[in-house]
Amino acid sequence: MVVVIIIVHTEPKFSYNDVTLILVHVGFLTEESGDVFSPKVLKGGPLGEMVQWADILATLHVLGHDLHISVSLKELQQ
C-alpha cells in the first residue's frame, strides 16, 4: 500500500488561521496497484481502513485546510 501526503505551505511559521494545501494520494486505490481493494469491500475486509482515512480527511477539512485527494498516478503527476 502506498500513501503519499504532501503538505505545501508558503509561510515559514504556522499559526491557527493558516490554510495549508494538502495533497493526499491514496495509492492502494490506484488502478496501477491492481484492483485488490474493491472485491474485498463487499466482504467487509478493508472498510475499517477506509473509515480511518475518512476520519483523517474530515478532520483536515474541518480544520480549514485545502485538500486535494488523488487516486490515480496520472492525477498525482498533474
Image (cartoon, grey):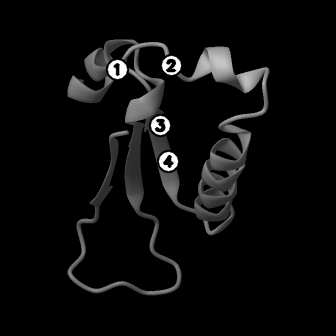
In space, the residues marked 3 and 2 are separated at their CA atoms by 20 Å
Alpha carbon distance from label 4 to label 1:
23 Å
Mark nearer the viewer, 4 or 1: 1
Residue type of the residue flagged with mark 2: Val
Q: Quadrant of residue 37?
A: top right
- Report x, y in % for residue 19: 46, 65
Instruction: Mark 1 vs mark 2: give the one in front.
Output: 2
Determine crowd level at label 3: few under 14, some 14-19, many 20+ residues with C-alpha closer than 10 A: some
Mark 3 or mark 2: which comes first in sequence?
2
Indicate the position of residue 62 as horizontal and vertical percent values. 69, 63
Task: From the image, state whether disc 1 or disc 3 is nearer to you.
Answer: 1
Amino acid type at circle 1 is: Ser
- The kind of secondary structure element at disc 1 is helix
The residue indicated by pointer 3 is: 69
Quadrant the C terminus occupies:
top left
Measured in 3D between alpha carbons, the distance from the residue under mark 3 to the one under mark 4, in whole angstroms, is: 6 Å
Amino acid type for the residue under numbered disc 4: Leu
- Label 4 sits on a secondary structure element that is strand
Q: Which residue is label 4 attached to?
A: 67
Question: Label 1: which residue?
Answer: 33
